[in-house]
Image (cartoon, helix red, strand yellow):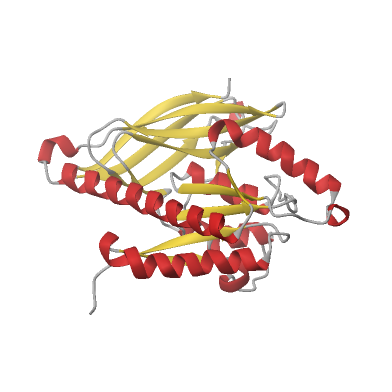
């Protein structure tokens, strides 16, 4: 019997040394979850991976193409590591690391698993293993990373992740709908500010958009202006595609982060204007921001 459901894209991200059989188990676990829980949750999970869904394209770095074609369209991510971190991209330690960071900064659910199956030590690339261990150590303070050593543990982790990811998304959607229907309580109020994080002695800067209001901010757009005499405007890595918004929806009382790319030629201070729509119509706030 037919039922209505939301289709949610789940990115499966991993370096090349993760066993192919593990990826098959993840696919089987998703299929089983859809059959057992899909109607109950009103959700169907669609697994997405570059090996299956990416289209060959010329003209941009590979990871940038993958981000546009696949990553930015996903609602959640399961990232799996074994003994390799992978090949570095222009911006991050590896493609999987970039996908983790990009989706997390967009407010998406990200789960990280580590394969601990027995492996012949002579087949391990020590340089890759060292890079992976350093990366894992760097994100452990902001992530619960779970290990698995057999098929049963992996399948159990995947099922738990799917329930958690879908439940969080449903709760956020219900909250947005409730506030949208309450009239005055559904106003959004979005302000920008700058956050920074030190990683391995390197400081990374992020533009944070904070919705302090009781309703969702939709069609969120960011404009960065700088006095030419003071330097160039900052570049912000948002979700914008073509003429679309930088962010489709910013949930009430939530915050998202977008990486700032600044060079020696960039202005130390800029004016940041954030505009969005709520039940009142188009709204905007402007703030002066500094890289301090």
Residue 251, image quadrant: top left
Farthest residue, direction bottom: 1
In x, y percent, where is residue 62?
Answer: 67, 61
Which of these two is toward me, 195 or 228? Answer: 195
Residue at position x 54%, y 33% in the image: 142
Q: How many marks?
A: 0
Going by the image, does 209 lie left or right of 58?
left
The relative height of residue 79 versus residue 193 in the rendered view (above or below) is: below
Give the residue displayed 35% in from the left and 35% down from the top.
254
Whether residue 123 is visible: yes
Q: Residue at x 28, y 59 (%)?
A: 41
Q: Residue shown at 29%/45% (left/top)?
A: 172
**Toward the viewer: 260 or 35?**
35
Which residue occupies the foreground of this view, 117 or 87? Answer: 117
**Observer-nearest residue: 235 or 4?**
4
Q: In the rendering, at what x and y percent does residue 166 appear?
A: 36, 54
Indicate left or right for 283 with 119 as reference. Answer: left
* Quadrant for the N terminus in the image: bottom left
- Is residue 110 shown above or below 241? above
Relative to 283, say whether 74 is above or below.
below
State the residue lying farthest toward the top: 292
Residue 120: x and y in percent read 83, 56
Q: Position of residue 35 (x, y in %)?
A: 36, 70
**Image quarter of the C terminus:** top right
């Amino acid at each position: 019997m037919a039922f209505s459901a939301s289709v949610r894209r789940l990115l499966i991200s991993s370096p090349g040394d993760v066993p192919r059989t593990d990826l098959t188990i993840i696919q089987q676990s998703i299929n089983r979850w859809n059959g057992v829980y899909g109607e109950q949750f009103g959700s169907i999970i669609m697994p997405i991976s570059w090996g299956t869904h990416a289209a060959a394209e010329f003209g941009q770095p590979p990871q940038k193409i993958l981000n546009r074609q696949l990553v930015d369209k996903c609602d959640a991510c399961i990232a799996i590591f074994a003994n390799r971190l992978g090949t570095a991209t222009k911006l991050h330690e590896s493609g999987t690391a970039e996908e983790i960071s990009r989706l997390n900064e967009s407010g998406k659910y990200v789960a990280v698993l580590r394969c601990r199956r027995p492996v012949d030590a002579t087949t391990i690339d020590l340089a890759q293993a060292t890079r992976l261990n350093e990366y894992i150590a760097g994100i452990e303070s902001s992530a619960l990373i779970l290990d698995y050593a057999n098929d049963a543990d992996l399948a159990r982790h995947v099922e738990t992740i799917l329930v958690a990811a879908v439940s969080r998304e449903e709760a956020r959607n219900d909250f947005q709908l409730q506030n949208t229907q309450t009239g005055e309580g559904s106003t959004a109020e979005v302000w920008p500010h700058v956050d920074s994080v030190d990683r391995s002695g390197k400081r990374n800067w992020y533009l944070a958009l904070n919705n302090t209001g009781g309703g969702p901010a939709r069609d969120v757009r960011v404009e960065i202006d700088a006095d030419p005499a003071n330097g160039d405007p900052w570049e912000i890595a948002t979700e914008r595609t073509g003429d679309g918004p930088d962010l489709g929806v910013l949930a009430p009382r939530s915050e998202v982060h977008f990486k700032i790319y600044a060079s020696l030629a960039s202005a130390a201070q800029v004016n940041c204007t954030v505009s969005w729509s709520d039940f009142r119509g188009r709204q905007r706030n402007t703030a002066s921001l500094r890289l301090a």
